Amino acid sequence: MAKLVVLTEGFTGRTLDLATAKTSLGRVDDNQFTLPEPSVSSHHCEVWLKGDDLIVKDLGSTNGTFLNEVQLGADKEGTLKPGQVLRLGQVELRYETGKKQSEQPRQTVRIGEGSTMVMTKEAGFGKKNNKVNKIFIGVGILLGVVTLGLLAMAFLKLSGSSN
């Protein structure tokens, strides 16, 4: 059975079994598949099967819908092939059909008259470097240290005024 497999850390192990009927994906509960992640829009996209291809329609998402790292325009449709990756904001999902795939999807690029180069994107399972999360953690630690310092100063003032 065709499915989308979530690759992003924190959501791994979640899958969406696909049907020919449209399925909505987004952050809020009224979607058929919910991804509670801030970079995913409330109603991010719709997907449906057409043969072995997965048709994806962006629903005007804030952080974009990407098919193999190529962004769909707002309210536009695109086609995802088996083995390719769909990204909604910061959440990545791989499209699988359950059929044996002999090779990775390839992208053909024309580099000159009569010359063609075939590029293969390797399936990535490594942890992504997420600078935004590191910044939030750093700011959180800084705010915690400042808060503790202010509390310590207030405590010292209170203990000094009671003498």
Image (tube, helix red, strand yellow):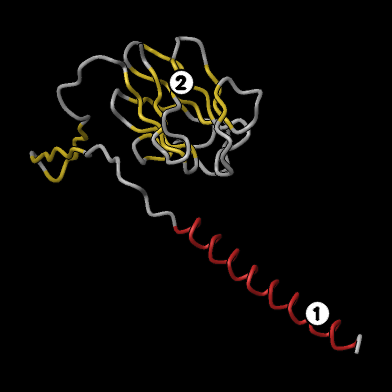
Where is residue 78 drawn, in percent x and y?
41, 27
Q: Quadrant of residue 107?
A: top left
* Relative horizontal placement of residue 151, taking residue 15 as reference (left or right): right
Q: Quadrant of residue 19?
A: top left
| Element type at mark 2 | strand
Q: How many marks?
A: 2
Residue at image location 37% in from the left, 25% down from the top: 79
Single out the mark in the foreground, 1 or 2. 1
Q: Which callout, 1 or 2, points at the residue further toward the start of the chain?
A: 2
For this rendering, which residue is in front, 158 or 43?
Answer: 158
Give the farthest residue toward the right: 162
Residue at image location 52% in from the left, 15% down from the top: 22
| Element type at mark 1 | helix
Disc number at residue 16? 2
Where is residue 59 drawn, in percent x and y?
57, 30
Q: CA distance from mark 1 to mark 2?
A: 52 Å
Where is residue 137 drawn, in percent x and y?
54, 61
Q: The disc labelled 2 sits on which kind of residue?
A: Leu
* Relative horizontal placement of residue 136, taking residue 6 as reference (left or right): right
Say above or below: 162 vs 43. Answer: below
Q: The disc labelled 1 sits on which kind of residue?
A: Ala
* Relative horizontal placement of residue 117, taking residue 61 as reference (left or right): left
Q: Write down the residue under mark 1.
A: 154
Q: Quadrant of the C terminus?
A: bottom right
Where is residue 111 drawn, in percent x and y?
15, 45
Q: Quadrant of residue 43?
A: top right
Residue at image location 48% in from the left, 60% down from the top: 134
Q: Residues within 10 Å of mark 2 (few under 14, many from 20)?
A: some
Give the farthest residue toward the left: 114
For this rendering, which residue is in front, 46 or 98?
Answer: 98
